[in-house]
Image (tube, helix red, strand yellow):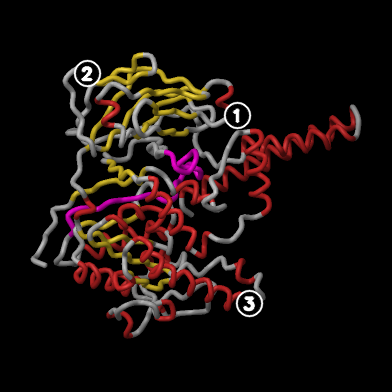
């Protein structure tokens, strides 16, 4: 069981204990006062829970985020005078630098019920970045795209339902233009490439999308159409396989540069633990990857037998790396993203790279899921992406932020809308929770779509973590 599953299990256990205690108190209250009072209190308690306590937040909002940046990181001196952020005299910023501002944020009493927001105003491109309700600790704002306003002394930081405290620390990271290089995006499932890197791959000179699994499980939406479990799973996997090679065309990547490997969802850990064994699908009654590879533009070596084994996955990745010769590989972060298929996909790429003559120059890591906070990036679609929660320093990290124009955000939203897995309507309970939160917690959802990934992924920033390699390159 991974860490996130353990945290979720503990969260649910504590909630059940709390509900049991509350039930005993309500029964006692009804016996001592009037019978209907416990019913009213139970309804009000449930509404309060849905409005303010339903988030999966597995750390205290008063915990500091703890980031370690490389020792050579530039830290231009800044000061917060009132609400104006000022650079020291003579300090110059590179326009496309990734700018991260560390400062303490403390919520007001209203910030315990309404999401605290830091507004970045004064420049040509205002922004809002949202934090945990009840926040009281060190946080990291993403000022990328605000270099001109900051250099001209026009950038103002305004807290809504929170106060900004202490002396801020600005870190500036300069990077090459990765979109000028050959990019290979590793997507554990169809839609992971779009969620993490649509802006990057749609703007790169040459992009390839490699999707590891068909994503065929949890096909309840298709069972409602009258299909049995196997038929529903196969239909879902086929649709997502089609999505993985067709949707990138919306971002300018032709199907000839999109590969679906057809391994089975949530079976990568079992494959990794027994590298020579074929691990079949949990729900589709399939033991052959070729079923979901029929849309691929060319055959791979493992198509000879179609065995869903770890060794075949490594062989596929080595073959593709040697064929594509990517300068940049985009893949899940090994510590920030806890999804088991994401972890195994990252580890498979690293293991494959140990046996390839071609080596990329750069790895760009992303996190589409987190251990500790299911709402990150917090706040509304179209706003900025602050650094995710990091409770405890694990390693030195180097962020890179790509800014997306309004048009790019809209195109990204449409690409996600084409993904079949993001189209089904959320359950009634989730829709009711959103209605309650809209009324009591002032939360909003943009009209891009009802799936929460539309809120989390359609942002003005795409955030990656950079790992530079030696880059053993050969002629093209």
Asked if disc 3 and disc 1 are in contact, CB closer than 8 Å, the reply is no
Question: Could you give the CA–CA distance between mark 2 and mark 1, rounded to whole angstroms?
Answer: 37 Å
How many numbered circles does the render carry?
3
Could you classify mark 3 by the number of other residues whose Cα lies within 10 Å: few (under 14), some (14-19), or many (20 or more)?
Answer: few
Q: Is residue 294 left or right of residue 48?
A: left
Of 59 and 366, the residue lying toward us: 366
Q: What residue sits 49% from the left and 51% below the top? A: 453
Of 141 and 127, the residue lying toward us: 127
Q: In x, y percent, where is residue 400?
A: 28, 43
Question: Could you give the CA–CA distance between mark 2 and mark 3, rounded to whole angstroms?
Answer: 67 Å
Question: Could you give the CA–CA distance between mark 3 and mark 1, rounded to whole angstroms?
Answer: 44 Å
Asked if disc 2 and disc 1 are in contact, CB closer than 8 Å, the reply is no
**Can you tell which quarter of the image residue 344 is in?**
bottom left
Q: Disc 2 vs disc 1: which is toward the camera?
A: 2
Image height check: is 3 above or below 145? Answer: below
- The residue most toward the left is 475
- The residue most toward the top is 82
**Span shown in magenta:** 360-383
- SS for callout 3: loop
Q: Is residue 413 magenta?
A: no
Q: In x, y percent, where is residue 381?
A: 47, 43
Q: Give the labeled residue for mark 2.
A: 88
The image quadrant where one finds the C terminus is bottom left
Q: What residue sits 35% from the left and 84% below the top? A: 305
**Can you tell which quarter of the image residue 65 is in?**
top left
Q: Give the labeled residue for mark 1.
A: 113
Find residue 228 and name its label.
Answer: 3
Image height check: is 471 above or below 84? Answer: below
């Amino acid at each position: 069981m991974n860490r996130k599953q353990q945290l979720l299990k503990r969260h649910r256990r504590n909630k059940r204990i709390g509900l049991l205690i509350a039930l005993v108190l309500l029964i006692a209250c009804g016996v001592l006062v009037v019978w209907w009072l416990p019913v009213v209190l139970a309804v009000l308690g449930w509404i309060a829970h849905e409005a303010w306590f339903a988030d999966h937040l597995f750390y205290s909002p008063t915990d500091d985020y703890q980031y370690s940046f490389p020792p050579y990181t530039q830290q231009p001196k800044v000061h917060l005078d009132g609400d104006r952020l000022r650079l020291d005299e003579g300090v110059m910023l590179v326009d496309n630098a990734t700018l991260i501002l560390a400062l303490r944020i403390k919520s007001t009493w209203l910030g315990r019920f309404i999401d605290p927001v830091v507004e970045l105003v004064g420049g040509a491109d205002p922004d809002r970045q949202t934090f945990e309700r009840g926040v009281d600790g060190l946080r990291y704002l993403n000022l990328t795209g605000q270099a001109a306003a900051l250099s001209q002394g026009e950038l103002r930081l305004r807290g809504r339902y929170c106060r900004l405290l202490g002396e801020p620390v600005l870190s500036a990271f300069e990077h090459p233009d990765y979109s000028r290089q050959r990019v290979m995006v590793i997507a554990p499932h169809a839609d992971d490439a779009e969620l993490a890197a649509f802006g990057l791959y749609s703007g790169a000179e040459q992009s390839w999308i490699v999707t590891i699994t068909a994503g065929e499980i949890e096909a309840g939406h298709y069972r409602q159409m009258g299909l049995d479990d196997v038929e529903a799973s196969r239909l879902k996997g086929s649709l997502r396989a089609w999505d993985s090679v067709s949707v990138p065309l919306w971002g300018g990547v032709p199907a000839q540069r999109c590969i679906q490997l057809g391994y089975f969802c949530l079976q990568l850990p079992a494959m990794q633990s027994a590298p020579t064994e074929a691990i079949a699908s949990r729900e589709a009654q399939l033991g052959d990857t070729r079923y979901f590879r029929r849309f691929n533009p060319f055959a791979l070596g493992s198509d000879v037998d179609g065995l869903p084994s770890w060794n075949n996955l490594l062989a596929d990745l080595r073959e593709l790396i040697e064929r594509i010769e990517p300068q940049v590989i985009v893949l899940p972060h090994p510590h920030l993203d806890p999804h088991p298929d994401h972890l195994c996909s990252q580890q498979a790429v690293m293991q494959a790279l140990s046996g390839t003559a071609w080596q990329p120059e750069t790895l760009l890591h992303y996190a589409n899921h987190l251990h500790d906070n299911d709402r990150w990036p917090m706040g509304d679609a179209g706003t900025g992406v602050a650094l995710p929660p990091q409770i405890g320093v694990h390693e030195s990290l180097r962020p890179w932020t790509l800014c997306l124009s309004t048009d790019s955000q809209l195109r990204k939203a449409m690409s996600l809308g084409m993904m079949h897995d993001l189209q089904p309507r959320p359950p009634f309970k989730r829709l009711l929770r959103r209605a309650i939160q809209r009324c009591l917690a002032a939360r909003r959802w943009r009209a891009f779509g009802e799936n929460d990934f539309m809120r989390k992924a359609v942002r003005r920033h795409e955030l990656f973590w950079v790992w530079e390699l030696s880059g053993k390159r050969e002629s093209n």
